[in-house]
Image (cartoon, helix red, strand yellow):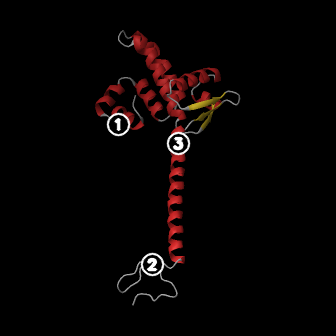
């Protein structure tokens, strides 16, 4: 399975494959619909040519599995950019019922292809970004430790200044300038 850029480069823009796709215009259109996220049109065209593919002795044993893989890939691509999606809108986009969609999404979640949870009551699917939560927690913990180190350093420096401790060189005083010290000439 290709991602969007690979699909464009290896299928839609490749000259040799483009000539091959011209021989099957419905398949070319289905690929274009898939690439442009028009999944209902893509799946509709695939259903239209399914009968022809089932007549091919080499392709027939693989048609149902290929269709299922393409549909699940489309569901994953549709959901990926969102934090939540209303399932009724998703069902319309895939031209299926809510029950069918919920069953397919449940299977994808169990296979860990989609990191999400389903709110069956409100018919909304919510993305789970566990990696993002963990990284945010780790960054906040790191920032807390950094703040603690800086604060400890500042308190130490404040104690040194209040007790008039400074490292003196032969001619100059190192440390922050104070009113009772002469600044460098």
**In the rendered view, would you say 180 is above or below 115?**
below
Determine the residue positioned at 41% across, 78% down.
Answer: 167
Circle 1 crowding by C-alpha within 10 Å: few under 14, some 14–19, many from 20: few
Which residue carries the number 3 mark? 134
Identify the image quadrant of the N terminus.
top left
Estimate the x, y position of residue 28 in percent, counting from the top left: 41, 28
Determine the residue positioned at 41% across, 87% down.
Answer: 184
Work out whether residue 84 or residue 35 is closer to the camera in this orientation and state it. 84
Q: Are marks 1 and 3 in contact (CB under 8 Å)?
A: no
Estimate the x, y position of residue 96 in percent, counting from the top left: 60, 23
Work out whether residue 105 or residue 184 is closer to the camera in this orientation and state it. 184
Estimate the x, y position of residue 143 in percent, counting from the top left: 52, 55
- Viewer-nearest of discs 1 and 2: 2
Which residue carries the number 2 mark? 166
Tell which residue pokes out farthest to the left in this image: 16
Which residue carries the number 1 mark? 9
- Viewer-nearest of discs 2 and 3: 2
- Viewer-nearest of discs 1 and 3: 3
């Amino acid at each position: 399975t290709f991602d969007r850029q690979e699909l464009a480069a290896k299928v839609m823009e490749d000259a040799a494959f483009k000539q091959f796709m011209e021989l099957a215009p419905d398949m070319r259109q289905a690929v274009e619909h898939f690439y442009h996220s028009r999944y209902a049109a893509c799946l509709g065209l695939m259903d239209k040519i399914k009968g022809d593919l089932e007549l091919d002795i080499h392709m027939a044993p693989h048609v149902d599995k290929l269709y299922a893989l393409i549909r699940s890939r489309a569901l994953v691509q549709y959901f990926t950019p969102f934090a939540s999606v209303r399932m009724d809108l998703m069902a319309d986009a895939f031209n299926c019922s809510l029950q069918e969609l919920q069953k397919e999404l449940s299977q994808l979640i169990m296979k860990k292809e989609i990191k999400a949870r389903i709110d069956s009551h409100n018919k909304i699917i919510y993305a789970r970004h566990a990696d993002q939560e963990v990284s945010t927690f780790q960054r906040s913990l790191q920032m807390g430790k950094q703040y603690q180190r800086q604060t400890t350093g500042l308190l130490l420096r404040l104690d040194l200044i209040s007790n008039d401790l400074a490292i003196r060189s032969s001619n100059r005083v190192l440390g922050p300038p104070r009113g009772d010290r002469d600044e460098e000439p």
